[in-house]
Image: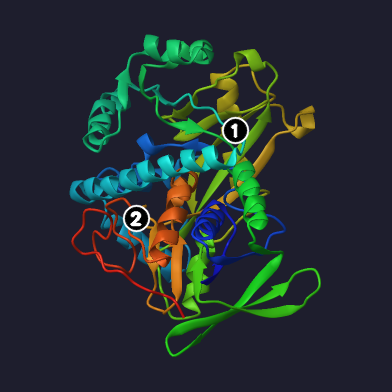
């Protein structure tokens, strides 16, 4: 079968790889000159199966309202004259209850465990190296009230098979000695040894190169201009080379929309409406000055809701969500404040370990922003759309790296008429269409 994958981030490239593994003919299209140059470029680096709670919970509405007045808040809602934003917000509020939270956690953990296993298989099969460290993830607290809720959160994850332990400060400092300089500010934490971290961009670009070796056509540097349908089915996609201006029409038996936040406007052109809205996130990547004192365990800072991961001789700090449309600016006063907050926190937690100087002071911090494609539930949309031969793999929010390998495999299996080995509600295919469900129906998309 000929399959076109639109989007070459971790989701699209993983989908392409697993389609190739099943013998399909694949064309991978992206507007950038290489894979993983947008949302997958400089994310938090964590494979965090144990920390995949959805944003929507009973406390979220009050927190979001309070945070609206702080430019460095973890979640910043910036109201726009945009019906999609308000509709998404109302759907999000509908998920802010205990029943929905528990239901959504179950889905996210199921996909996370499936994806982590898939990633391990892919690494074993390909030998890709990407600054991987299998040292787990630690979540540290600086506020006693917040730490009091850590046990309940860990219990939720344990009910779904995730071994997240609540630990005291001494055990946390033994697990990650690099935190000792900040130890007096820590009241406790949680830890999951099974999680890991690594550079998503490096992995994705190397996997894309292997896709090309397996015969995939990589149309990088091509804008997607139009999805062509007839009789309620996808027929082709028109793309244009950014360098030459040459347009071409690509025919296929199946098409996959994996364009992150841009999946929403793309699918609107063929009458498909999906609840994916961009959440602007930030990161800073800093050179290490004292590698022997740098952390090797990836961490979550509960106070600022940010993630910290070591990538070789650099330290990556990432976080915050800004709901304000498709804004990618880094030079506004708000963006600068959020970037500066990330760097300032690194200096507080690991004083002198990384080069936190500004460019004016002779430093070289690498700031980045990307649009995380979020659904109100945080559950990605993986499956078929209402348009024949058109599939979707998008909406992974902050968990694209965690869920990428498994999402790509699951969709490749669905397109191939197989049944993914997890109990997950695949988009457009009925509830519970994973293994163990009685609602599974085999679908063929062959031309």
Query: Is 130 left or right of 75, judged from the image as shown?
Result: right
- Which residue is labeled 1 in the image? 316
Frontmost residue, 120 versus 428? 120
Q: Is residue 208 at all visible to an observer of this figure? A: yes
Q: Which mark is residue 136?
A: none
Rendered view: 301 above or below 373: above
Q: Between disc 2 and disc 1, whose residue precedes? A: 1
Residue 247 in the image, given as x and y percentages of width and height: 72, 79
Residue 420: assigned label: 2
Nearer-the-camera pick, 198 or 21: 21
Q: Is residue 36 visible?
A: no
- Which quadrant of the structure image shows residue 439? bottom left
Residue in view at x 28 percent, y 56 percent: 434
The residue shown at (70%, 19%) is 289
Q: What is the secondary structure assignment of the residue under circle 2?
A: loop
State the residue at coordinates (68%, 23%): 288
Location of residue 94 in the rendering, given as x and y in whole percent from the top left corner:
26, 58
| Residue closer to the observer: 286 or 339 | 286
As drawn, the residue found furthest toward the front would be: 23
């Amino acid at each position: 079968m000929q399959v076109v994958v639109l989007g070459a981030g971790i989701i699209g490239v993983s989908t392409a790889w697993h389609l190739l593994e099943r013998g399909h003919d694949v064309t991978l299209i992206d507007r950038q000159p290489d894979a993983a140059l947008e949302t997958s470029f400089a994310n938090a680096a964590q494979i965090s199966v144990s920390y995949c709670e959805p944003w929507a919970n009973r406390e979220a509405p009050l927190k979001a309202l309070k945070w609206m007045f702080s430019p460095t808040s973890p979640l910043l809602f910036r109201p726009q004259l945009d019906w999609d934003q308000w509709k998404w917000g109302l759907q999000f509020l509908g998920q802010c209850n205990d029943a929905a939270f528990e239901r959504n956690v179950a889905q996210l953990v199921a996909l996370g465990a499936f994806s982590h296993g898939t990633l391990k298989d892919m690494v074993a099969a390909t030998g890709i190296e990407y600054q991987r460290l299998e040292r787990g993830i630690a979540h540290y607290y600086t506020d006693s009230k917040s730490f009091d809720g850590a046990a309940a959160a860990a219990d939720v994850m344990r009910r779904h098979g995730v071994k997240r332990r609540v630990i005291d400060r001494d055990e946390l400092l033994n697990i990650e000695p690099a935190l000792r300089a900040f130890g007096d500010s820590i009241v406790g934490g949680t830890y999951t040894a099974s999680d890991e971290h690594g550079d998503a961009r490096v992995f994705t670009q190397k996997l894309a190169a292997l896709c090309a070796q397996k015969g995939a056509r990589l149309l990088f540097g091509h804008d997607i201009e139009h999805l062509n349908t007839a009789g309620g089915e996808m027929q082709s996609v028109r793309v244009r080379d950014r360098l030459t201006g040459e347009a071409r029409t690509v025919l296929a038996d199946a098409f996959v929309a994996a364009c992150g936040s841009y999946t929403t406007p793309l699918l609107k052109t063929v009458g498909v409406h999906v609840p994916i809205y961009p959440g602007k996130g930030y990161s800073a990547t800093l050179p290490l000055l004292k590698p022997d004192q740098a952390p090797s365990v990836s961490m979550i800072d509960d106070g600022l809701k940010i993630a910290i991961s070591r990538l070789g001789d650099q330290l990556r700090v990432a976080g915050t969500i800004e709901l304000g449309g498709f804004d990618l600016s880094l030079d506004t006063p708000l963006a600068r404040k959020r970037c500066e907050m990330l760097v300032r926190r690194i200096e507080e937690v690991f004083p002198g370990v990384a080069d936190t100087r500004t460019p004016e002071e002779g430093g070289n911090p690498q700031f980045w922003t990307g649009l995380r494609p979020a659904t109100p539930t945080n559950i990605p949309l993986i499956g078929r759309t209402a348009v024949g031969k058109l599939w979707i793999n998008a909406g992974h929010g902050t968990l694209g790296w965690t869920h990428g390998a498994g999402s790509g495999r699951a969709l490749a299996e669905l397109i191939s008429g197989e049944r993914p080995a997890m109990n997950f509600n695949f988009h457009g295919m009925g509830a519970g269409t994973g293994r163990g469900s009685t609602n599974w129906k085999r679908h063929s998309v062959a031309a």
